[in-house]
Amino acid sequence: MSIGKPPKTLLLYIWYGFCLLCTVGTAYAELSKDTSWHIIDSKYTRIRYHSWKDLKKFSNNINYSYRAFDLKRLFTKKSPDDLENEIKQKVDAVYERVQEILDMRKLMKKVIITVYHDKKALHAAYQEIFEKPCRFRAWYVYESNTIYLNVRDTHEGVLAHEIAHSIIDHYLLIRPPKATAEILARYVDKHL
């Protein structure tokens, strides 16, 4: 008895089964992580946030003017696109100002800004990443080029300080000592 080629339908069923298993496995892995992140890409950053409310609070807390004051903006309701564009412009303006203060201008990989809802969520993220309690209000991780912020305790100075860490670490060929980078980041915060 010879074994011939399997029928095409059998191969098709095997392929569909394999694809289904891969999809279920991927979906299960995604469910085990927090899949509710939304992303906004700006010129220099990638902003990750959970809710529209957090995004609006983030925008309200970043009081960095990227254009002249407009009374009409105070009394008009913002659409999601308007808010996203406003945040992109504000964050990019802060980024460019930090580059200007440091005199460190070059094309760099986008920095990821992860915005958490509150201090508890931010500290839980720190605990998960570093396996120790958090004692910071915001922080930056060089390896992933990521800034971690608490939306309730964020303003343009905190954002500029953390962006400064990213720029300093990626501009220089050799990363400066932590104390030096911290002095420069504090300088940026004060001169924003």
Image: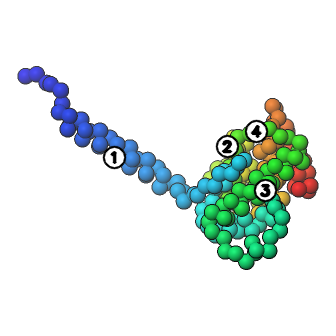
Percent x, y of residue 82: 66, 64
Q: Can you tell which quarter of the image residue 86 is in?
A: bottom right
Q: Is tag 1's residue or tag 2's residue first in the polypeptide sequence?
A: 1
Query: What label does residue 144 carry, if any?
Result: 2
Label 3 vs 4, first from the N-terminus:
4
Residue carrying label 4: 107
Which amino acid type corresponds to the residue marked 1 in the rendered image?
Answer: Leu
**Looking at the picture, how far across and down is residue 175, in whole percent?**
81, 36
Q: Give the foreground label among 2 and 4.
A: 4
Mark toward the start of the polypeptide (1 vs 3): 1
Mark earlier in primary sequence (2, 4)? 4
Tell which of 27 and 32 is nearer to you. Answer: 27
Disc 1 from disc 4: Cα separation:
41 Å
51 over 172 or under it: above or below? below
Numbered disc 3: secondary structure: helix
* Tag 3–tag 2 contact (CB < 8 Å): no
Which residue carries the number 3 mark?
159
Pick the residue in front: 86 or 185.
Answer: 86
Q: Is residue 131 left or right of residue 96?
A: left
- Circle 3 packing at 10 Å, graded few (<14), some (14-19), many (20+), is many
